[in-house]
């Protein structure tokens, strides 16, 4: 057993240089320490993402002209950045012991994620506050209506009372009550509204409201929280595609499937099954291939993240003559 001071020094180094282990769906499942990954600093507006390929970590750029090997310009997110500045900073301070001053945390526009409703029910202008700002009267920039400090304080207390993450075992009725309470005072663009809706969707699989409309609202909020090519944005696009397919609105689904495909190409690469499945989904939709709902929706469900050896498959395909293909392979049904 090392001396107390040595042990404490090692513990601090491990704690500060550790990173989250997460599934390709973005769910955190543990922590690890890696000498290479520890070189990358955090940003709530990351320029790169970590993709786990078995025991291997791949750093992939999310924005153009970023060299993932240049750690002075390449930033990853240590946490779930789909939350308010207050929650992000609190978690970073608790787990990594620093006060985040990244470009997003220093951007006042980020505070729209904690906006409340205008006191005028006919006005849709967000009234920007934060969970910890001093409660005060707010004059709406659009309609001039005044929101009193008691309403501001009520909204702040509500946001601070909500958990940073929702327990999957939380009763759906409890989430519905919280959502109804939040929607009465928080603006639809508020990230707490979005997280309540997604939690309820994950638990029940549905909402009483128009599910396509809700998914689109969540998508708009995600675009404020995540980089344009972040996997979470891609997954939300697939939720919209699935809802549109179920409504038999395949024409509208084409664009959303195409955007999801492009995001997964950036996040995971051309040999990843998430990209390949979404490529197939978009192709079937775009070519109006007569596939059933079940067949199309199956392509939105990811079960295998093992990379596909495309080069070997193409080499095998090239080695087979057209005549052999016609004799040995079953004819396509479509």
Image: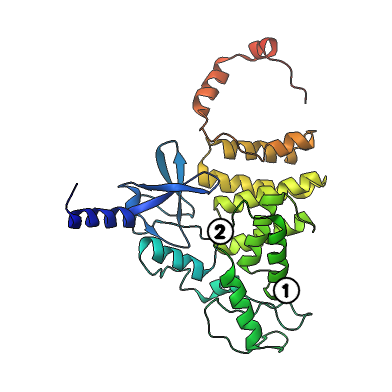
Secondary structure, mark 1, is helix
Please report whichever mark, 1 or 2, sits nearer to the chain's N-terminal start: 2
Relative to 283, does residue 94 appear above or below in the rendering?
Answer: below
Q: Residue at x 52, y 44 (%)?
A: 24
Say few, some or many: other residues with alpha carbon within 10 Å of mark 2 (under 14 / 14 to 19 / 20 or more).
few
Q: Name the one closer to the observer, 240 or 328.
A: 240
Q: Residue at x 47, y 70 (%)?
A: 105
Q: Residue at x 56, y 50 (%)?
A: 231
Q: Name the one closer to the observer, 319 or 168.
A: 168
Q: Which mark is residue 9?
A: none
Residue 125: quarter of image: bottom right
Is residue 202 visible in the rendered image? The answer is yes
Is residue 70 visible in the rendered image? The answer is no
Q: Which mark is residue 184?
A: 1
Relative to 179, does residue 26 appear above or below in the rendering?
Answer: above
Q: CA distance from mark 1 to mark 2?
A: 21 Å
Judge from the rendering whether residue 86 lies leftward or rightward of residue 118; answer left or right: left
Q: How is the image coloured?
A: rainbow
- The percent position of residue 108, horizontal first and vertical second, equals 52, 76
Relative to 53, does residue 21 appear above or below in the rendering?
Answer: below
Relative to 308, does residue 259 appear above or below in the rendering?
Answer: below
Check the image and name the residue furthest to the left: 3
Judge from the rendering whether residue 74 lies leftward or rightward of residue 190; answer left or right: left
- The percent position of residue 33, horizontal first and vertical second, equals 34, 48
Say few, some or many: other residues with alpha carbon within 10 Å of mark 1 (under 14 / 14 to 19 / 20 or more).
few
Residue 175: quarter of image: bottom right
Residue on which the image places disc 2? 165
Check the image and name the residue furthest to the right: 248
- The percent position of residue 110, horizontal first and vertical second, equals 54, 71
Secondary structure, mark 2, is loop
Image quadrant containing the C terminus: top right
């Amino acid at each position: 057993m090392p001396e107390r001071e040595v042990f404490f020094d090692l513990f601090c180094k491990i704690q500060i240089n550790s990173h989250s282990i997460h599934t390709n769906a973005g769910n955190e499942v543990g922590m690890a320490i890696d000498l290479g990954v520890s070189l990358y600093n955090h940003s709530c507006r990351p320029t790169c993402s970590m993709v786990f390929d078995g025991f291997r970590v791949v750093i992939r750029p999310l924005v153009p002209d970023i060299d993932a090997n240049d750690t002075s310009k390449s930033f990853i997110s240590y946490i779930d950045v789909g939350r308010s500045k207050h929650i992000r900073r609190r978690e970073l301070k608790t787990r990594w012991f620093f006060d985040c001053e990244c470009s997003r945390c220093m951007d006042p526009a980020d505070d729209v994620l904690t906006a409340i409703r205008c006191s005028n029910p006919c006005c849709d202008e967000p009234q920007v506050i934060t969970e910890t700002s001093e409660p005060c009267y707010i004059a709406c920039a659009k309609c001039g209506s005044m929101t009193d400090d008691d309403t501001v304080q009520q909204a702040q207390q509500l946001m601070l009372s909500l958990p940073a993450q929702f327990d999957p075992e939380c009763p759906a009725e409890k989430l519905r009550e919280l959502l109804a309470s939040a929607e009465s005072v928080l603006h639809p663009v508020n990230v707490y509204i979005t997280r309540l809706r997604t939690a309820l969707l994950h638990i029940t699989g549905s909402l009483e409201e128009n599910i396509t409309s809700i998914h689109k609202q969540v998508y708009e909020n995600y675009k404020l929280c995540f980089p344009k090519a972040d996997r979470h944005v891609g997954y939300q696009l697939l939720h919209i595609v699935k809802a549109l397919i179920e409504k038999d609105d395949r024409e509208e689904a084409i664009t959303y499937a195409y955007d999801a495909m492009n995001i997964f190409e950036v996040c995971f690469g051309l040999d990843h099954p998430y990209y390949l499945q979404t490529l197939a989904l978009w192709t079937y939709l775009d070519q109006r291939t007569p596939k059933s709902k079940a067949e199309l929706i199956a392509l939105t469900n990811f079960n295998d993240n093992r990379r596909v050896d495309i080069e070997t498959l193409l080499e095998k395909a090239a080695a087979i003559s057209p005549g052999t293909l016609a004799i040995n392979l079953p004819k396509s049904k479509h």
